[in-house]
Image: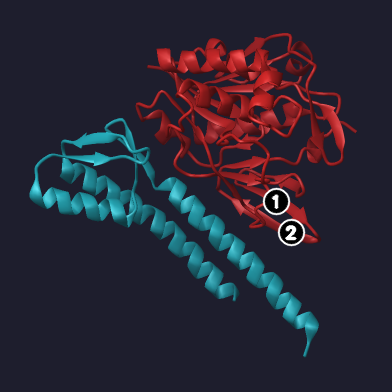
Chain colours: A cyan, B red
Amino acid sequence: MDIGKLKKYSDLAYELNITKRNSLEKMRARQVMAYEGRLFRADTQTINTVSTLKAHSKQFYLLDINENPCLIKEPEDFLTKLIERNQETLNTLSQLHDSLQRRK
Amino acid sequence: MTTGVLLYCFDTPNTAYHKLALKSIDLIKKNLNLPITVVTDNDTHRHFSQFLGVTYILIKHQTKNYRYYRGQNIPWYNMERANAYNHSFYDTTLLLDCDYLCYTNDLLELCNSNYDFLLHNSVHDITGKNRILKKLESTLPIVWATVVMFKKTEKAKQIFEMIQHVQQNYDHFRNLYRIKHKNYRNDYAFAIALHQLQGQITTPMFIPSPMNMLPHEYDVLEITDNSVIYKYDKKINMIQNTDVHVLDKDFVNVR
């Protein structure tokens, strides 16, 4: 057993895990977006909810992050912005993930 | 409608806060592109050259407070933040600590909302060690006054008036909420004011993502245009293009 090698591996794993954790936090922070004066998170849950409600109604209410209601008057516009922001953040995360994979 | 950033910066005998503020101003101009107001004193002001888009308000600050930092009590001039509503020229203000480094424009989203008042109620320790929040420090739901977005509305005005009231009667409120620390901390004053003003019920008026923090046990080696490089226990790491609150002050200490 080479303890030095194991420690080196452990140090690298720590560094990679921290980088991944911080990148996920950065992604979540970037996913916060203002719309109609309210704050929403451009994550899959919001996208799915908006997509489902949009299929049933031209306008609908949605709770924002701080649980305040917001009338979504233009669901198509909102959905487009949510998806754009979501994919922008995931694209950045994906690039970082690829660079971390190469360091392993 | 105007939007701007408000910073408070006072050098102490131990810490040259102006060095942090200068870096912070650079990053705000680059990433937020907002006008800045710096509230400072005469001694600190002479370190600031004239920046385009930066206004200075010179005041005489209170000097009674102190903070515990790496084994010793050192002076801490943090009492003026309660006057932020009156010091701000803007309709929408981002009140920031001068050791909060803006590497993104994420805070602009908050300004585009119609919330009167927003601040963090959670933190993310970027080292992964979760050293920031200690247990049983008070009976309060904690908030962080490091980053505050407020608008010139009646509601925000009331909050700041309540903060001033808490500050003037801090010993009473500190006992009431069983706050462990004896010094005056804006985090607690803001938390108490919100708790009192909201009828002692936690009302969500929070910035949705946690505030990134680098604990004071970690030594900052360098602050560059896109990263903070830090060291702990012989390990060197960095955080890139991410807003972060840096607690280590040794790298700007007056030696």
In the rendered image, residues at marks 2 and 1 fall on the same chain: yes
Please name the residue shown 76% across and 26% down the image. Answer: B183
Q: Quadrant of the N terminus of chain B?
A: top left
Q: Please, is residue B54 above or below residue A32 in the view? A: above
Task: From the viewer's side, name the closer residue of A72 and B133.
Answer: B133
Quarter assignment of residue B20: top right
Quarter assignment of residue B6: top right
Please name the residue shown 71% across and 20% down the image. Answer: B171
User: Would residue B43 be found to the left or right of residue B20 on screen?
Assistant: right
Q: Amino acid at mark 2?
A: Ile
Task: From the viewer's side, name the closer residue of B9 and A92.
Answer: B9
Residue B236 is marked as: 2
Q: What residue is shown with label 1?
A: B229
Q: Amino acid at mark 1?
A: Ile
Give neighbour class at mark 1: few <14, some 14-19, many 20+ (Cα, 10 Å): some
Q: Chain of mark 1?
A: B
Q: Chain of mark 2?
A: B
Q: Please, is residue B232 above or below residue A31 in the view? A: below
User: Would residue A45 be found to the left or right of residue B103 on screen?
Assistant: left
Q: Secondary structure at mark 2?
A: strand
